[in-house]
Image: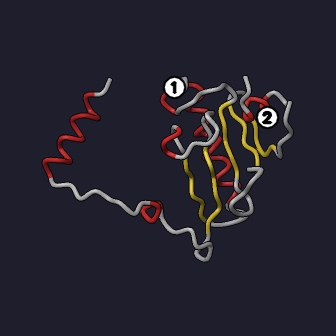
Amino acid sequence: MDCIFCKIVNGTIPAKKLYETQYSLAFLDAFPLVLGHTLVIPKNHYGKVQDMSESDNRDLFETVRVISGKLESISPSALIAIHNGKESGQEIPHVHVHIIPRNSSDGAGPVHSMFSKKPSLDEGEFEKIAKIIQNKK
């Protein structure tokens, strides 16, 4: 497989590893947005979160919790983000969680600032969307 994250897991490509478990790995992003920008990945290859096994998912998010606490030595807050599929901005098709230390002067803003076109939904439209999602198997 030609996945850069799989190559980091198997040691073909070096990374600044911060934390590792049987199922997940945390390392510094090679192209950080801020100091301490960290990626957490499952060691097994998955394209999207919903493809992950329960054990890999549980371990991944426990690792996110642990690393988030450790990053408080850099900044009191962090943005935790997952691009889940190509259309959402996922550049490497291997599940990865960004943990980005944040402070009030970094200029990044909240997640709502990312979207210039926001829907205005009435109660019926909210209900329709909820039913579609609830009925999805």
Q: Quadrant of the N terminus?
A: top right
Q: Is residue 21 visible?
A: no
The percent coordinates of residue 18 (x first, y second) are 78, 46
Task: Say above or below: 132 vs 44.
Answer: below
Q: Which amino acid does label 1 sit on?
A: Asp
**SS at mark 1?**
helix
Quarter of the image where one finds residue 33:
bottom right
Q: Which amino acid does label 2 sit on?
A: Ile
Residue at 39% over, 63% down: 116
121 sits left or right of 118 in the view: left
Q: Quadrant of the C terminus?
A: top left
| Residue at the spot of label 2 | 8
Q: Is residue 39 visible?
A: yes
The percent coordinates of residue 62 (x first, y second) are 60, 39
| Residue at the spot of label 1 | 51
Q: How far apart are marks 2 and 1 (CA)?
A: 20 Å
Q: Dot 1: within a 10 Å radius of its alpha carbon, few (fewer than 14), some, or many (20 or more) residues?
A: few
